[in-house]
Image (cartoon, rainbow, N blue to C red):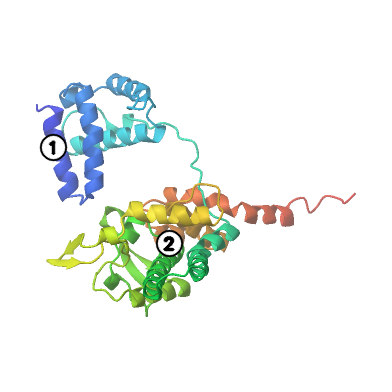
Amino acid sequence: MNKLSIYLKEYLEHLEIEKNRSRNTLINYDFYLHRFVDWCKDVKPTEITYDMVRNYRLWLNRLVDVHGEPLKKNTQNYHLIALRSFLKYLAKRDVDTLAPEKIELMKMPDREVSFLDSGDLDRILEAPLAKLKEQGTSSKKKNTNEVADQKRATKSRLIAYRDKAILELFFSTGLRVSELANLEKEDINIKRDEFTVRGKGKKTRVVFLSDSSKYWIAEYTKLRGDLNPNLFISHDEISKKKEKKGGKDFEYSPLTPRSIQRIVQGYAKMAGITKHVSPHTLRHSFATDLLRNGADIRSVQTMLGHSSITTTQIYTHVTDSQLRNIHKNFHGKDRKKD
């Protein structure tokens, strides 16, 4: 019988070809499973026992990173999920090994969802235009070159419109930051209220555009006047001549997910929001807004692109206000009033 490392190579190829997993998934599974193979000294599948896995879990729990910090509980679970998936693959190939269902995951506390209330949401969505207005007021106070001022004003407006379109699109669609960063102009037909996006696992889903998001995307792309196919690009001088696509050079490179995160965080700070805000916070706000206004959880699951309803159920806490109203209206009606 082969050692684990041989089967692991075949398993990763199986994920890539048969399962069509993303590059990031392959990299993560490769890392998690090689860590187990190295830890157990590349044993044969028949040598994997319940006690061995238990000792591995203890080792993971006591492992510290370069900063002296222990592995987070969810990161330890990722290692176990990868191992369980690997054992399922071996079982399907009739390779004698530990039954995958014997690997239990750590009990995790309920996940807390961070979202913006209506006041914070309004302020962050208006922040790009507020910043533009502030820049315009500031420039009027300076006696500088008129041509340079005009050029600077055009660039400021371009960036403000881009950022406004990004924020509106996040709240309108609940896109993940990687999904938004990968959008191209041809992906979105402004005349329609919907478009298809390719998400995790290369699965496609339909997302819907609000009137506000359509308006600002149109205003931004109309102002750009370039041939770059990417929907959102950097407008910094240092990003010039960086992007090459289809044999063509484009003046500016597309925004990366990290750049978009910094944009969102910057406007959250500008809006006076003290808690940490990320693109995922806007995704949470999108889901929360739908549920609070009466959307059913199955529909929200579809719009978010969750493969399991369990993932979407983290948002059910937002219906607490509705439950409170039901309790108030229907509880204790038969009791005599004092």
Crowdedness of circle 2 by 10 Å Cα count: few (<14), some, many (20+)? many
- The amino acid pointed to by label 2 is Phe
Q: Disc 2 marks which residue?
A: 170
Left or right: residue 262 versus residue 196 is right
Which numbered tag is attached to residue 75?
A: none
Q: Quadrant of the N terminus?
A: top left
Marks 2 and 1, how far apart at CA: 38 Å
Q: Position of residue 279 (x, y in %)?
A: 42, 54
Image quadrant where residue 50 sits: top left
Q: Position of residue 250 (x, y in %)?
A: 21, 67
Q: Residue at x 43, y 67 (%)?
A: 160
Position of 172 relative to 275 (above/below): below
- The amino acid pointed to by label 1 is Lys
Q: Position of residue 100 (x, y in %)?
A: 28, 33
Q: For the residues labelled 2 and 1, say whether their Cβ atoms are less than 8 Å apart.
A: no
Left or right: residue 284 versus residue 230 is right
Q: Disc 1 marks which residue?
A: 9
**Label 1 residue SS:** helix
How many marks do you count on the picture?
A: 2
Q: Residue at x 56, y 49 (%)?
A: 317
**Label 2 residue SS:** helix
Residue lying at the far bottom of the rendered structure: 191
Q: Is residue 193 visible?
A: no
Q: Position of residue 288 (x, y in %)?
A: 52, 57
Q: Is residue 116 visible?
A: yes
Residue lying at the far right of the rendered structure: 338
Image quadrant where residue 248 sits: bottom left
